[in-house]
Image (cartoon, helix red, strand yellow):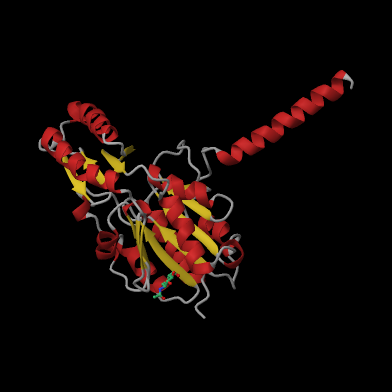
């Protein structure tokens, strides 16, 4: 083989490797912000006769982030569009939240749609059927101890535990700013000492049981249950979320759906296809779907 041939072969294989890696890596993505861009992106993905599965995170996606989870309210424009989409026979709607499934349902208040809670560990289907992801006894027993330790050693001073029975969120948003890094580090180390997985969130640390199950697995489970193993041939999928735990769903749906990451940072690296700057843009996307999804 000539040197030129070797060089061109090497160049070719590194391009292939880059292409493969590129698919599997989080990267910066284009932003959509106005109705024209939304129209371009959505109208080239969804056709007139398509069915749609719309999978949405709640906090930071449908509701602007609030100082306390109980204060979060769905954006009124998103709410109106979702209400309409929930009754569209061509649209399947699921909320996939870090909240408990019941809590997410109380926030969204729509009947006959699916709610996945605790990052997908529990699912209440639109028809009331339930799914609970198996967690072994030992892990379950450690959970209560972990809650107690977090509360006794770090509770107060603005920090508190949102106990969701299978997973928890340790919030430190109201802790004085200088102390926040310490709270974050100590909560992470307590969570990990119980064998739970600690994820950084917005002024919070989330503790999830060490199971291979996340928002991505939950999204795929819902799609398979509702549309069968060949769901990619039957339904278009749109996912939107704003947090690191939502990246699991974006990764799982890469190539099989269209994902939007809500973030103020244009340089954010994500598995989503597009970034949107705020929950207001999510409202615009929902309104586009309301206006363009076939109603019959
Ligand atoms: C409800 O829907 C789920 C998901 O499609 C399905 O697995 C389950 O069998 C249904 N339950 C009933 C009682 O029909």
- Using the image as rendered, state which of residue 39 and residue 204 is in the foreground: 204
x and y percentages locating residue 148 in the rendered image = 14, 41
| Image quarter of the N terminus | top right
x and y percentages locating residue 241 in the rendered image = 40, 51
x and y percentages locating residue 219 in the rendered image = 45, 57
- Residue 5 seen: yes
Residue 273 located left or right of residue 158 = right
Figure quadrant of residue 120: bottom left
Q: Ligand 1: give its quadrant.
A: bottom left
- Residue at far front of view: 137
| Residue 84 to residue 232: above or below | below
Residue 109 located left or right of residue 145 = right
Question: At 23% from the left edge and 49% from the top edge, which residue is drawn?
Answer: 66
Q: How many marks?
A: 0
Question: At 47% from the left edge and 70% from the top edge, which residue is drawn?
Answer: 91
- Using the image as rendered, state which of residue 253 and residue 230 is in the foreground: 230
- Using the image as rendered, state which of residue 225 and residue 40 is in the foreground: 225
| Residue 48 to residue 177: above or below | below
- Residue at far top of view: 3
- Residue 276 seen: no
- Residue at far right of view: 2
x and y percentages locating residue 174 in the rendered image = 16, 38
Residue 43 located left or right of residue 270 = right
Question: At 23% from the left edge and 45% from the top edge, which residue is drawn?
Answer: 141
């Amino acid at each position: 083989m000539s040197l030129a041939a070797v060089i061109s072969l090497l160049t070719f294989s590194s391009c292939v490797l880059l292409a493969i890696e590129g698919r599997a890596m989080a990267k910066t993505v284009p932003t959509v912000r106005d109705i024209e861009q939304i129209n371009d992106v959505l109208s080239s993905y969804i056709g007139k006769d398509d069915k749609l599965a719309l999978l949405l995170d709640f906090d930071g996606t449908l509701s602007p982030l609030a100082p306390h989870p109980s204060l979060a309210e769905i954006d009124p424009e998103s709410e109106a569009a979702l209400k309409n989409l929930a009754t569209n026979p061509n649209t399947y709607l699921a909320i996939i939240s870090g909240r408990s499934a019941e809590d997410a349902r109380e926030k969204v208040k729509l009947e006959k749609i699916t709610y996945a809670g605790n990052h997908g560990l529990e699912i209440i289907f639109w028809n009331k059927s339930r799914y609970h992801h198996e967690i072994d006894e030992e892990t379950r027993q450690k959970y209560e101890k972990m809650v107690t330790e977090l509360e006794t050693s770090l509770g107060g001073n603005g920090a508190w535990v949102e106990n969701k029975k299978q997973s928890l969120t340790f919030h430190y948003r109201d802790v004085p700013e200088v102390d926040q890094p310490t709270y974050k580090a100590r909560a992470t180390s307590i969570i990990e000492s119980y064998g739970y997985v600690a994820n950084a969130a917005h002024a919070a640390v989330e503790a999830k049981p060490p199971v291979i199950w996340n928002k991505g697995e939950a999204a795929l489970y819902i799609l398979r249950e509702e549309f069968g193993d060949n769901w990619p041939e039957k339904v278009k999928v749109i996912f939107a979320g704003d947090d690191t735990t939502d990246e699991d769903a974006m990764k799982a749906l890469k190539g099989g759906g269209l994902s939007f990451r809500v973030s103020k940072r244009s340089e954010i690296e994500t598995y989503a296809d597009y970034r949107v700057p705020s929950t207001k843009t999510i409202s615009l996307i929902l309104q586009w779907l309301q206006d363009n999804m076939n109603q019959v």
